[in-house]
Image: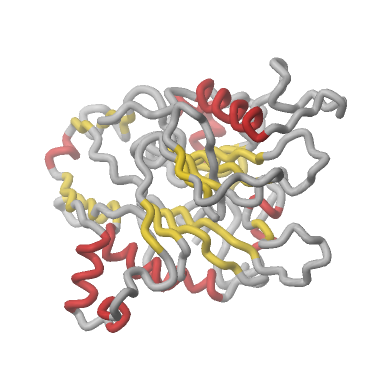
Amino acid sequence: MTVLEFVHWVIMAGLEPSLEVTERRPAPTLPADASLTFVNADTTWLVQIPLRDPTASRRWYNILLDPWLTGSQSDVASWFSKQSHAVEPALGGIGEVEQFCRKVEELSGRRSETSGDTNHADSPTSPSLIDAVAISHEFTDHCHEATLRQCDPSVPVFANRKAVDLIRGWKHFDTVIESPPFDGEHSNWREASVDPLPTIMITFPLSSDPDDSDPTAEAIIYTPHGIHAPSLSSVASAAPSIRTLALLHGLHDVSIDWGQQLNLGAHNGLAAQRALHARYWIGTHDEEKKGGGLVSWFLRRKAITVEDALLEAAAKGDGEAKEEGNVLGDGEFMELGNGKSAILA
């Protein structure tokens, strides 16, 4: 299992006034919490991680996940599989994502005119405010060439092996890096970070106090197609320890008639959430897209709710599911629609 093939340790945010924002608590002078913005109705997310240095020219480190913001997507050939969004993305291209990030910096109140640093939100000539792009899968609804080519070539891209080969073949980006492994043999999450990605971009410390001896970190686990609960054992054995802030796992069970499972759905998501004790479970990759091509005739989708998953677990004798008031154990399910944001406090 690799970090970006199945599991992503990344954290997201967004505060654009034109989008609907859900805040868990008022924003502090220096941002203390990461947050998520659902950039489209499928599985494109913007991650903004608060930077702890009060002297820095920016407040946020921005990571864009699986951007598909324009046009349709096709795998193999259009006659085989072609899809388009049923709902227009809240941000309709990389330029709008850049504007969004710039607005977040402005709303955060950071001004750097006196710092002499030109890399800040107030400068019209500043480089991209997207600090990294992460690609979870080589399929074009995750690795969308037309969208990715809108990114500044200087933005580093992290992806799994197959996606890395595709992206390098475009000869657009200066830096394309295969995501490092995070498994039983590599349980130290600090070792799963590679340049130019800082260690805190894999997880970030719970405390900004340099004298705090507690090395525990928080993480978001992003698994758009789902991951079986036993495969998450490396999280429990991670060193230093990791608390799962959020699990991004879809609700819909999606398969193809000839037996290929595509998205594992809510029943698996519930098992994963309980294995991780995630504070939040957030749905992803559940957009019912407009499809065409041969595959569309054989695609099967079961829309399952969290309540459905809980009822089935209870019917199977799951004591945890039957316990009164214990809906998701330690956490809660959060539904974010296209263009909505949440601070993960």
Residue at the spot 71% in from the left edge and 22% down from the top edge: 122
Residue at the spot 44% in from the left edge and 59% down from the top edge: 280
Inspect this view and state whether residue 162 appears: no
- Residue 324's place in the image compared with 68, above or below, is below
Inspect this view and state whether residue 292 appears: yes
- Residue 320's place in the image compared with 225, above or below, is below
Q: State which quarter of the image contains the C terminus.
A: bottom right
Q: Which residue lies furthest to the top in this view?
A: 124
**Residue 324 horizontal side relative to residue 58, left or right:** left
Colour pattern of the rendering: secondary structure
Q: Which of 271 and 321 is in front in this view?
A: 321
Q: Where is residue 233 in the image (x, y as percent from the top left)?
A: 49, 73
Q: Where is residue 246 in the image (x, y as percent from the top left)?
A: 48, 58
- Residue 126's place in the image compared with 282, above or below, is above
Q: Count up the numbered dots.
A: 0
Q: Residue furthest front?
A: 26
Q: Where is residue 30 in the image (x, y as percent from the top left)?
A: 71, 45
Q: Which of 165 and 322 is in front in this view?
A: 322
Q: Nearer the viewer, residue 291 or 35?
A: 35
Q: In which quarter of the image is residue 299?
A: top left
Q: Nearer the viewer, residue 143 or 96?
A: 96
- Residue 249's place in the image compared with 115, above or below, is below
Q: Where is residue 284 in the image (x, y as percent from the top left)?
A: 36, 48
Q: In which quarter of the image is residue 90?
A: top left
Residue at the spot 67% in from the left edge and 54% down from the top edge: 193
